[in-house]
Amino acid sequence: MNARYGMVIDIDRCIGCGSCMIACSAENNVPSLPQATPRTGLTPILVRHVSNGSDGTARREVFFPILCMHCEHDTPCVHVCPQQAVEVDKATGIVMQMPQRCLGCRYCMTACPYHARYFNWWDPAWPAGMEKSLNPGVAVRMRGMVEKCNLCHARLHSAKEKAAADGKREIDPRDYIPACVEACPTGAIQFGNLADREDPVSQSAQSPEAFRLLARLGTEPKIYYKSKEAWVRELAESKSSQPAGVSHG
Amino acid sequence: MKLTRRDLLAWTAGATAGALLTPVPWKILGDASIWTQNWPWIPQPARGPVEVQQSNCTLCPNGCGMRVRMAVGWAVGVSGSKNHPVTHGGLCPLGFAAHQLNWHPQRLRTVRHENAASSWSAAQTAFEKACSEGPVVFIDGYPERAASEVMQSFAKKHNGSYRVLPTPEVQALAAYETWSGVPAHSLGYDLENAQTIVSFGAPLLEGWGIPGRFTRLWAESAGVADPPVRLIQIEPSSSRTSARAWRWIKAPSDANGALAAGLARVLIEERLVAANGPLPATSLEETATRTGLSTDAIRDLAHTIAAKQPALVIANAQDPNIAALNVVLGAIGTHGGIIRRSKADKPYVRAGDLVGSARAVVIDASVPWAFVPETGAEVFRFAAWNDGFKKANWLLPAPGFLEELTDVPSAPTSAVETYAVATPLMKAPPEIQSLPQFLVGIDSELPPVGKLIEERCDELFRRHEGDLHTLAGKEATVAPVSFFDSVQKLKEQLWKGAVWTGALSHSNSLRCSLKEWPSSDAAQLAAEPSSRCGIPISPPLASKLHEESALFETPTGRQA
């Protein structure tokens, strides 16, 4: 059976420490861009800071890690790509970005309702010698193309290779955990196979507290969020492009 | 046959259309797209098998357990070790890029003297001269290591002194040291057994204590209306901790001592706790005026704290009033309170701004750059990263991340004693020397760090106490030390990244006798210098948190 990899992010547990952002960049050989701004940076997972807009001790704040939602149906970025550089992998449900095909037209960035895609404005560069610390499993991408989260696809490859070496057809779920999930100090990000009803993540996605961002668009994102706080759940369906209290984080 | 212009155009159009039906243009386009991904100036990762090594972070005294992925002799990835008995997979955000620090542009690779290139022999000559002319003061930011023992031995032998720059967490425990005689560095917080945690401005979710310890505890009750562990944050402005606390009390930080006194008064007067201390002189009305809270709000807070015991109060800095509140709550030497972690009975002399009449000051690489002694003495500063010359006469290049053999003693806030070893996983650049190596080079009678670590392992084996947590692989194994039939096997596991833990002690060996409520002047002791635990320099990837997003404000001063 085909897998449908996805996440459930518990907003109540996220403390906005940024561990996921650093671990993601280190894993995927994303360079540091000190000349970048929050508009031009390269952050496949970006933690946004959101408040309920109240003041004083009534103020509530939460952090939303935003990454590619890996939309299952009518995936907007797939439809608009003139190069077929984006596709939904049938075996895993991961929305794949193929840098070799990307022309850098940025149609997909415009189409993405979650602003989870980033244009690579600069040549990737590291201080002298630091290339030795790059992850051998992930190729460095050129400037002039779009980047996004691919659920640490290199780790899936490694898990498949390991399973094949052990003579198994299926991977051990413990061998495939994206870097952000591994790094989260509060266990706010859970990762699993949404197609497997026995998977705790699949069950968590069905809980009444779970929700998806802009679910009304019908793109069936595979990144779920959950929170016990009603204002957080309401915010997820906000029809305004920049609701009050949201800061670009 | 005559070739016309029309024929030429028709042929060109036909050839173009025909070519599109062949794989040639598509192959060229595909290859071109690949070639344009591989310009010579684009860095290529090293190719080679990846293996995982278990180790322990040495960048700050928290000593987090980490899994280091190695390829071709270099670390290519770091993640937390889920099976670590204290850190449980937690790392500070910057720790995930710690493996890049050894190539940081600010890496110190050569000896520098007064901002000019120099040599180790010149530094040694200058240091020997200083030792012969007067006392030398050593300043250590990470005490209890074998390296610290070398410094202490040298200082003792050569009429010098050894001082420690405490972390704010240890500094906040100073009052208990005064009242109980037990050194602050041997005390810890039994967070796991507390049910109410009252934080006076301590950044519990932002980098207080051991990364992954409190955050894990907090996460278990996050979002629950009546959580098993209640976090009450007292802070003047919104922070990550106050935003995620069970209850946030907005009060000015300079009134923390007054609020602690007011709470103690309510707790004692209304018999909410067994009276364990003298009544503060501060009245409730006075507390209300200082804090801006109503007397009812203070009374309500005291009732809330007393409702769910054990309650533990944590201060962000040294404040005897806050410490005295813990005494009133009975949170000293008990379950869920401040406990004595180790049997150490000798407090360290703290490093202040003034180092007296020292001839030279030697600062270990574990001391953060922010610490600058006010002294006319010659300063020898060991550092792996260069953060400016104004702070030292001599800059001496020290080993970076996982480049030396060192040991990892208990973290400052830990409730249990721990011991681990970090082996050098990466090759250090030439011309790198640690402070103990430098001292052993001058006085060959001093024991080298490796020998001291072996002696400490022998001692653990002789004591036959505690457990060894072997972390390699997916499943952790825990075995009592008595299970090992030879010290060699114990050492072998420690060298592979295993962690020894002692037993959690509530043996009431910590008693604080508080005859009178501390005076408000005592709170001013908080001005002592301290070192916030943290990575010594930001890795370049910190730009993701500062420049490339607005998650954190850009730090002033040092930039990656």
Image (cartoon, coloured by chain):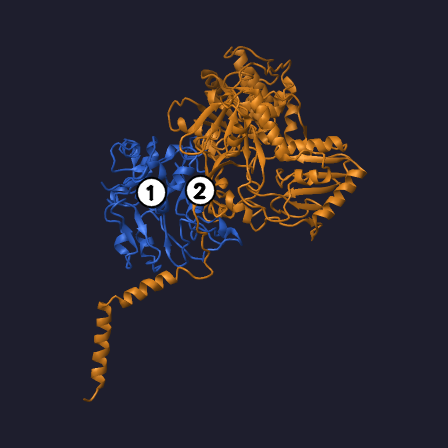
Quadrant location, the N terminus of chain B? bottom left
Residue that appears at 68% across and 44% down: B391
Q: Secondary structure at mark 1?
A: helix
Quick check: can you spot residue B326?
Answer: yes
Amino acid type, residue under disc 2 in the picture: Glu
Amino acid type, residue under disc 1 in the picture: Ala
- The residue that label 1 is drawn on is A165
Could you classify mark 2 by the number of other residues whose Cα lies within 10 Å: few (under 14), some (14-19), or many (20 or more)?
A: some
Q: Residue furthest bottom?
A: B2
Q: Chain of mark 1?
A: A
Residue B252, given in percent of the width and then of the height, sits at 55, 30
Q: Nearer the viewer, residue B545 or A91?
A: A91
Residue B174, given in percent of the width and then of the height, sits at 62, 24
Q: Nearer the viewer, residue A70 or A236?
A: A70
Q: Secondary structure at mark 2?
A: strand
Give the label on residue B51, or none.
Answer: 2
Which chain is in orange here?
A: B
Cα separation, mark 1 vs mark 2, equals 16 Å
Q: Quadrant of residue B23?
A: bottom left
Q: Is residue A156 above or below residue B198?
A: below
Q: Chain of mark 2?
A: B
Residue B146, given in percent of the width and then of the height, sits at 62, 32
Q: Nearer the viewer, residue B444 or B97?
A: B444
Which chain is in blue here?
A: A
Give the label on residue B548, or none.
Answer: none
